Image: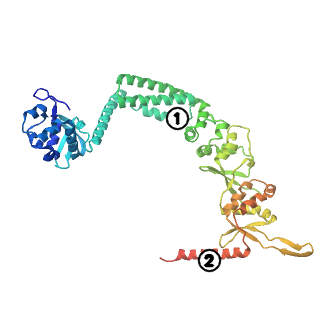
């Protein structure tokens, strides 16, 4: 720092700010390093070269430190290490005099010397000269942020004072666009979105960076007029398409934008109207719920009933002469819309049968198990197999029935083979038969090898004796579990 002294404008060796810090520090008290510097500066507020030369009291060590810039820099660095920012800066309601330079300031920083215990409050100008004091950089950064925020708040108030009663225009416009009841044509949607973006940017850019308020507000008003014109076009479009059954509503539009942007683009470029290609990619359960009854009008078979739509599946039931008790099953929404729904909604003469259903999954329940088993047990027995569930243990088995054969062509004696078992479960049984649920019995019989391979995969055959031992162990385990449930604590 440079300043004029009263003795001819010579460069200061110690500024007023430095002098205050030196006097309140411990470093310069070291006589071995600095000689009598500490005692000599007591009467000075600042020290120039001329004053040092005219005062013979300063000893050699003191002069060497002050006259050599490098020596003084080392000394001041050590002094800075003694000081730290004691607490957060404050904004003073009444201006306070800085204890380093004496100037009045509203932004006050507090520093403390960890060796002498001295405390000082300094202003925002002086604090810039001592960035090496611990914590000061953070406090200066916080002040800078506060000043930016205060300036931005000032600009915000200036801008909004010009908006007057129309201050909520931006929020209202954003909500109108966000909540528009149908998807807008691509060009109109883009223009409205861009206009709203420019509106927001013009205001926020002024608040953040400043500029010519009159010019900025003039642009803002023109953008408001542009939005009003575009929104009028949007209303006109809505009146044209609101009764169109294939129009994409707001809810589905949002779903597409989140889950399939490319399909959203195609629908928007088609004036917001679905076709078979784009509907095939709509898997939103809310949309399917609204359209499922319309789709089911195209179903030829009367033994299929739609029950409900869940997040990813449509739930159906089938009941006919083959299935005396209704069996419930699901189809993924994705598969259903790709193969059936997209055509049922776009082609008035389209019809479909249960043969078009794919990726069927029978829902796991005891009622479904009994209904499916009753419908297939004749074929199972004919092929030499059965599926049993033990009543006492609920253990399920895929069973190979006993086979009868003669010992040899010369011996008419018939031998019966032992039944064999593979441990299984109802879930596997229903999963295996799901693809055959809507097929006829000849198809099931012709493809029985697929069923057999699925039921036997990864399982080991056991004998009747081994099965009985398993059952006995399972009954014992169940009995022990029941005893635990009734044990008093």
Q: Is residue 324 visible?
A: no
Foreground of the two, 151 or 59 = 59
Q: Residue 274: x percent and y percent?
A: 63, 35
Say which mark, if any, is on residue 180. Answer: 1
As drawn, the label of residue 384 is none
Disc 1 crowd rating (10 Å Cα; few below 14, some 14-19, many 20+) is some
Residue 19, image x and y in percent? 15, 39
* Quadrant that contains the N terminus: top left
Q: Position of residue 226 (x, y in %)?
A: 47, 24
Mark 2 residue element: helix
**Residue matched to label 2:** 476
In depth, the one of 349 and 281 nearer the eye is 281
Q: Is residue 82 in view?
A: yes
Secondary structure under tag 1 reads loop
Q: Indicate whether 432 appears above or below 472.
A: above
Quadrant of res 398: bottom right
Task: Report which quarter residue 328 is drawn in.
Answer: bottom right
Residue positioned most to the front: 60
Of tags 2 and 1, the one toward the viewer is 2
Give the quarter of the image for residue 294: top right
Q: Is 482 placed left or right of 352 in the picture?
A: left
């Amino acid at each position: 720092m440079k300043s004029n002294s009263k003795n001819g404008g010579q460069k200061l060796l110690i500024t007023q700010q430095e002098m205050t810090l030196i006097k309140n520090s411990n470093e310069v008290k070291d006589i071995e390093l600095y000689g009598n510097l500490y005692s000599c500066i007591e009467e000075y507020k600042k020290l120039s070269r001329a004053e040092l030369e005219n005062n013979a009291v300063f000893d050699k060590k003191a002069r060497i430190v002050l006259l050599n810039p490098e020596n003084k820099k080392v000394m001041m660095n050590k002094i800075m290490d003694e000081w730290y920012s004691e607490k957060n800066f404050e904004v003073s309601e009444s201006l306070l005099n800085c204890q380093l330079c004496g100037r009045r300031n509203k932004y006050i920083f507090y520093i403390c010397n960890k060796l002498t215990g001295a405390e000082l409050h300094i202003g925002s100008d002086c604090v810039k000269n001592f960035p090496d004091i611990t914590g000061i950089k953070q406090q200066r950064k916080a002040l800078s942020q506060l000043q930016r925020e205060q300036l931005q708040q000032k600009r915000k108030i200036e801008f909004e004072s010009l908006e007057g009663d129309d201050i909520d225009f931006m929020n209202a416009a954003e909500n109108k666009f966000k909540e528009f009841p149908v998807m807008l044509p691509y060009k109109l949607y883009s223009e409205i979105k861009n206009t709203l973006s420019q509106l927001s940017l013009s205001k926020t850019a002024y608040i953040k960076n400043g500029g010519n308020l009159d010019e900025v507000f003039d642009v803002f008003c023109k953008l408001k007029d542009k939005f009003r014109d575009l929104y009028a076009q949007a209303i006109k479009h809505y009146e044209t398409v609101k009764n169109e059954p294939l129009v994409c509503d707001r809810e589905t539009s949002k779903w597409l934008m989140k889950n399939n942007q490319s399909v959203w683009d195609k629908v928007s470029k088609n004036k917001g109207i679905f076709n078979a290609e784009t509907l095939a990619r709509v898997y939103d359960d809310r949309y399917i719920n609204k359209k499922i009854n319309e789709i089911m009008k195209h179903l030829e078979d009367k033994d299929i009933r739609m029950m409900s739509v869940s997040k990813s599946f449509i739930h159906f039931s089938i009941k006919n002469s083959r299935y005396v008790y209704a069996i419930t099953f699901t189809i993924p929404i994705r598969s259903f819309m790709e193969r059936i729904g997209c055509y049922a909604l776009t082609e008035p003469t389209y019809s479909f049968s249960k043969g078009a259903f794919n990726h069927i999954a029978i829902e796991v329940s005891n009622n479904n198990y009994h209904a499916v088993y009753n419908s297939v047990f004749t074929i199972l027995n004919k092929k030499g197999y059965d599926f049993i569930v033990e009543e006492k243990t609920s253990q399920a088995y895929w069973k190979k029935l006993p086979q009868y054969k003669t010992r040899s062509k010369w011996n008419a004696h018939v031998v019966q083979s032992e039944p064999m078992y593979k441990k299984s479960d109802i879930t596997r049984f229903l999963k295996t038969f799901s693809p055959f649920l809507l097929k006829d019995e000849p198809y099931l019989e012709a493809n029985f090898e697929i069923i057999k391979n699925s039921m036997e995969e990864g399982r080991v055959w056991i004998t009747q004796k081994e099965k009985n031992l398993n059952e006995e162990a399972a009954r014992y385990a169940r009995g022990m579990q029941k005893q635990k449930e009734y044990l008093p604590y």
